[in-house]
């Protein structure tokens, strides 16, 4: 049985304590996840207080789901998040492309191919 997804209040920024309450973890857990998951980068004020946005909270909720419900390891959760990100980018790309004129679409396709080639080359070199 799945737990209900917590309601995120309608505001722009959240302090770490608010996020901890929404997500149901302690603030030190959020700070630890920031060190482990590069996707999680809340902004900071001049006084170094963390400011989370809605997108950050959604990411934290997904990390918690992967670790606590799906029982992923930290490394497994990192890989799953990367996979989800690339799938979301691929789904977004065709919609954005259709809005472009034909000449710009072919240019964009060429850049996408170059990017994929560079990514695969980078993976080979690691």
Image (spheres, grey):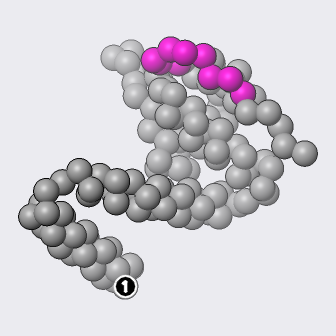
- Relative vertical location of residue 80 with respect to residue 20 in this rendering, above or below: below
Q: Which residues are magenta?
A: 6-14
Tag 1 secondary structure? helix
| Whole-percent x, y for residue 3 in the image | 83, 37
Q: 29 or 91: nearer the eye?
A: 91
7 drawn magenta: yes
Residue at (84% x, 43% y) in the render: 2
* 88 on left or right of 109: right
Q: Quadrant of the C terminus?
A: bottom left
99 drawn magenta: no
Kindly indicate the quadrant of the structure image that contains residue 41. top left
* 91 on left or right of 17: left
Pointer 1: what residue? 124
Residue at (41% x, 62% y) in the render: 90
Q: Quadrant of the N terminus?
A: top right
- Relative vertical location of residue 38 with respect to residue 49 in this rendering, above or below: below
């Amino acid at each position: 049985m799945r737990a209900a997804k917590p309601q995120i209040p309608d505001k722009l920024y959240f302090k770490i304590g608010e996020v901890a309450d929404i997500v149901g973890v302690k603030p030190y857990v959020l700070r630890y996840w920031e060190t482990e998951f590069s996707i999680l980068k809340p902004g900071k004020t001049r006084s170094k207080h963390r400011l989370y946005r809605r997108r950050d909270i959604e990411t934290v909720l997904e990390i918690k789901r992967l670790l606590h419900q799906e029982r992923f390891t930290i490394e497994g959760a990192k890989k799953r998040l990367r996979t989800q990100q690339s799938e979301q980018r691929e789904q977004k790309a065709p919609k954005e492309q259709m809005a472009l004129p034909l000449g710009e679409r072919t240019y964009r396709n060429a850049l996408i191919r170059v990017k994929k080639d560079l990514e695969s080359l980078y993976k080979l070199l690691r």
